[in-house]
Structure formats: structure tokens, C-alpha cells
């Protein structure tokens, strides 16, 4: 397995879902012993939070599961990301539409919904920003489950 694979997680603001996905997926990649072969990043389609850290509620919920996302900083999605990353994984249909608009103009890696890699039967990772703590736990559950499916997909690609 010498091929290096890169994964980008995308949500709206890059302070809740996508940094959580980056942190959880990094942990799954480490557990699979693939940390030298998989590059992981996250970003948002909006520019509202550039340079800011993840939402404190996301950090707390992830921390309870042994995932530290405190050092991550929000950045905005760029058309160049479609050329750089092997997987451009978005959290919901609106993110998908926004990124696909750019993809249709520029080509590169076709974006996909994250939960397509899972078995939950849920199509989108809901934005927990305006909800309660339960929302952050639900996001983690969905991300962990889909992350395991994505790991299997990448392992199959590398085999």
C-alpha cells in the first residue's frame, strides 16, 4: 500500500460537522494504521468562521469520545480542493449543491454525501449548531458509522 489518499470533509461553516468528521476520521485512520497513507482536512462552503476553532460544543462532544479537535481552524472551500483531494465528502444536500456548482465549472473530484458510506439510512449529517447537546452526539454517531464505511472503501482502493 504505497498510494497516498486524501480526504476533505465539507460543511457550511467548518466549525461543527466537518471538523468533527476530520477528527473522528483521523482517529479511525490511526486505528487502522493508515496515518502515513491518508491525508485528512476539512473546510466550509461559507467564509463566516475562517481562522476560528471548532464550536466549543463540538469540541466537548468529540473530547468525550477521545477525539481532540481543538487545534483545527476553519477555512473556506476552494475550487483547487477538487484537484487536490481524492475524496470530497460533504455533510448535507445544500453543501453538495454548492460544491457541485463549482465542480461542474472546474471538474476534478466529484463530491459525495458522507452518509453514503454508512448504513444508518440517514441521508444527511444534520447541523447541530442551533440545537441542543443531543444534536452533537447524533452527529458523532453518524460520523463514526460513516467513517468506518469510508475506511473500508479506502482500504479496498489501496489493496
Image: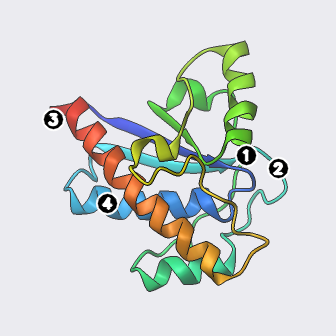
Q: Is residue 32 visible?
A: yes
What is the basis of the colouring in this image?
rainbow
Give percent across and percent down for residue 45.
Answer: 75, 43
* Circle nearer the viewer, 4 or 3: 4
Q: Residues within 10 Å of mark 1 (few under 14, many from 20)?
A: some
Q: Residues within 10 Å of mark 4 (few under 14, many from 20)?
A: some
Residue for point 27% across, 60% down = 30
Identify whether 72 is placed above or below 103.
below
Question: Residue 76: which numbered mark, if any?
Answer: 1
Q: Residues within 10 Å of mark 3 (few under 14, many from 20)?
A: few
Q: CA distance from mark 1 to mark 3?
A: 31 Å
**Quadrant into which the C terminus falls:** top left
Q: Which residue is mark 4?
A: 28
Question: Residue 5: which numbered mark, if any?
Answer: none
Q: Is residue 70 visible?
A: no
Q: Which residue is mark 2?
A: 47
Q: CA distance from mark 2 to mark 1?
A: 6 Å
Q: Is residue 76 left or right of residue 151?
A: right
Amino acid at each position: 500500500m504505497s498510494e497516498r489518499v486524501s480526504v476533505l470533509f465539507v460543511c457550511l461553516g467548518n466549525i461543527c460537522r466537518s471538523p468533527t468528521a476530520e477528527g473522528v476520521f483521523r482517529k479511525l485512520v490511526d486505528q487502522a494504521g493508515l496515518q502515513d497513507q491518508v491525508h485528512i482536512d476539512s473546510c466550509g462552503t461559507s467564509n463566516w468562521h475562517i481562522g476560528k476553532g471548532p464550536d466549543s460544543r463540538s469540541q466537548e462532544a468529540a473530547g468525550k469520545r477521545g477525539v481532540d479537535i481543538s487545534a483545527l481552524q476553519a477555512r473556506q472551500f476552494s475550487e483547487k480542493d477538487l484537484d487536490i483531494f481524492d475524496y470530497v465528502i460533504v455533510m448535507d444536500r445544500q453543501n453538495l449543491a454548492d460544491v457541485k456548482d463549482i465542480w461542474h465549472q472546474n471538474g476534478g473530484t466529484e463530491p459525495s454525501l458522507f452518509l453514503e458510506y454508512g448504513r444508518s439510512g440517514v441521508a444527511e449529517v444534520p447541523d447541530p449548531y442551533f440545537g441542543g447537546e443531543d444534536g452533537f452526539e447524533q452527529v458523532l454517531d453518524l460520523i463514526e458509522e460513516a467513517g468506518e464505511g469510508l475506511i473500508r472503501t479506502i482500504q479496498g482502493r489501496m489493496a
